[in-house]
Image (cartoon, rainbow, N blue to C red):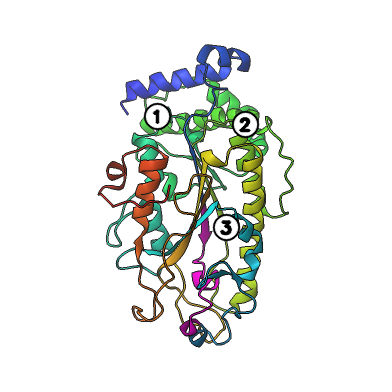
């Protein structure tokens, strides 16, 4: 951005902050504008969730041969098809599957997979090739070029203290926060408020100007999100977990018609190298019970058709269990979609092929960028090739 344009925009934002809220509404007609377009919620399983013990191929003898003490016994699997079933910890999710608001894509990955947590997550965040290094994320680039009216950071919100690379564009980026009230208390600090409202003679310096703009954007977003967070209080009973608390906040902001198109939340701890079963099932239960409440909340407010939820992990685990009754870093994995506008509820494709492995790892059947292409083209109304840097075929998902 040219310095002159930046200073002009900074001045406008700063001026807007000093106008009483009710005048802001009238003057700019946007603060309380109703949400337009559909909402995408991304849920990240951090640590590389074991997909084979999540969606269990309970009819496949190779599964039990490779995991003699880690496989989910057939009698415990929640069977939802003739070949596949849910981990028993996902019982709360089975109702969503039965209601036709859940689609499971098996064997999702990419060519030449990287088993490093950091690098693999980078690839998923940026939608790059495994040999390519990018500094911007796929959702950040969507904000850059194709999200109409998305100049404010709160158009993409991550429920966390730090912002994922996925939400960082080249010109725009999303907004990370854990709680609107806490954020408001922080930005209401008298010194920060004074700095934000006082023009500085040093704004011609680019670094100072950038910091000033970031401060003003943060204060403006904090005010907006705090007001929106008070509009709707859910009556749905959410579980007592940090993950469920994040989902509850997202639901309340969506229901309040917050002008946000992307929400991002994470559930961490899936790096299960030893004694996997109890740990993974505790996390899966948190996920399932949180999602059940979240979907019920959206349904109750007639919003499920406007919201699409995608859950992914940076990689799956190896097919064979290790000596510590856990699993090591692998490749392809399953991906979940939930919403009221799915083209194909249930299983989108067949189970992973356990008899055709790549050095002990599952071979991917669906490139994750095919899924991104579908979400960009058909859900966010954005041209995927421009954002992803190349064309992928897309899938009949939504």
Mark 2: few/some/many CA within 10 Å (<14, 14-19, 20+): some
Secondary structure at numbered mark 1: loop
Location of the N terminus by quadrant is top left
Q: On residue 5, which mark appears?
A: none
Mark 1: few/some/many CA within 10 Å (<14, 14-19, 20+): few
| 247 left or right of 357 in image | right
Q: Which residues are magenta?
A: 43-63
| 189 left or right of 207 in image | right
Q: Eyeballing the image, is 189 above or below 316? A: above
Percent x, y of residue 233 = 71, 36
Which comes before the other along the chain, label 2 or label 1? 1
From mark 1 to mark 3, how far is it between C-alphas?
33 Å
Q: Which residue is mark 3?
A: 97
The reply to whether the C-beta atoms of the residues labelled 2 and 1 are less than 8 Å apart is no
Which comes before the other along the chain, label 3 or label 2? 3
Of circles 3 and 2, the one toward us is 3
> How many numbered badges does the structure rendering display?
3
121 or 219: nearer the viewer:
121
From mark 2 to mark 1, how far is it between C-alphas?
20 Å
Instruction: Kindly give the residue lying farthest to the left in the view shown.
Output: 390
From mark 3 to mark 2, how far is it between C-alphas?
27 Å
Q: Which residue is mark 1?
A: 148
Percent x, y of residue 257 = 58, 30
- Residue drawn where x is 60% and y is 42% of the image: 250
Which comes before the other along the chain, label 1 or label 3? 3
Percent x, y of residue 223 = 60, 28
Task: Report if residue 169 is visible in the image.
Answer: no
Q: Which residue is mark 2?
A: 256
């Amino acid at each position: 951005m040219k310095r002159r344009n930046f200073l002009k925009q900074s001045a406008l934002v700063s001026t807007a902050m000093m106008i009483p809220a009710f005048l802001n509404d009238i003057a700019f007609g946007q603060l309380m504008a109703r949400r337009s377009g559909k909402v995408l919620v991304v849920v990240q399983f951090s640590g590389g969730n074991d997909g084979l013990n999540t969606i269990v191929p309970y009819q496949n003898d190779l599964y039990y041969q490779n995991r003699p003490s880690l496989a989910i016994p057939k009698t415990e699997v929640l069977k939802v098809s003739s070949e596949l079933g849910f981990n028993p910890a996902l019982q709360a999710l089975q109702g969503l599957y039965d209601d036709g608001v859940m689609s499971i894509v098996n064997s999702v990955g990419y060519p030449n997979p990287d088993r490093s947590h950091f690098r693999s997550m980078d690839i998923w965040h940026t939608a790059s090739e495994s040999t390519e290094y990018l500094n911007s994320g796929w959702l950040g680039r969507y904000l850059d070029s194709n999200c109409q009216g998305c100049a404010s950071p709160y158009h993409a919100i991550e429920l966390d203290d730090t912002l994922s690379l996925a939400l960082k564009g080249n010109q725009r980026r999303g907004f990370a926060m854990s709680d609107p009230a806490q954020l408001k208390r922080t930005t209401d600090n008298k010194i920060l408020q004074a700095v934000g409202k006082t023009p500085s003679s040093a704004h011609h310096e680019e670094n100072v100007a950038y910091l000033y703009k970031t401060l003003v954007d943060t204060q403006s977003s904090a005010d907006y999100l705090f007001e929106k967070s008070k509009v709707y209080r859910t009556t749905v009973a959410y579980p007592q977990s940090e993950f469920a608390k994040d989902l509850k906040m997202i639901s309340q902001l969506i229901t309040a018609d917050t002008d946000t198109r992307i929400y991002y939340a994470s559930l961490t701890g899936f790096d299960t190298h030893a004694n996997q079963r109890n740990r993974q099932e505790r996390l899966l239960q948190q996920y399932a019970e949180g999602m059940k409440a979240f979907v019920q909340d959206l349904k109750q407010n007639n919003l499920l058709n406007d919201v699409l939820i995608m859950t992914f992990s940076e990689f799956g685990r190896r097919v064979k269990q290790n000596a510590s009754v856990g699993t090591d870093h692998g490749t392809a994995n399953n991906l979940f979609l939930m919403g009221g506008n799915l083209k194909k509820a249930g299983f989108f494709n067949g189970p992973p092929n356990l008899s055709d492995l790549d050095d002990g790892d599952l071979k991917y059947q669906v490139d994750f960028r095919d899924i991104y292409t579908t979400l960009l083209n058909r859900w966010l109304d954005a041209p995927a090739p421009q954002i992803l840097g190349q064309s992928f075929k897309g899938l009949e998902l939504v």
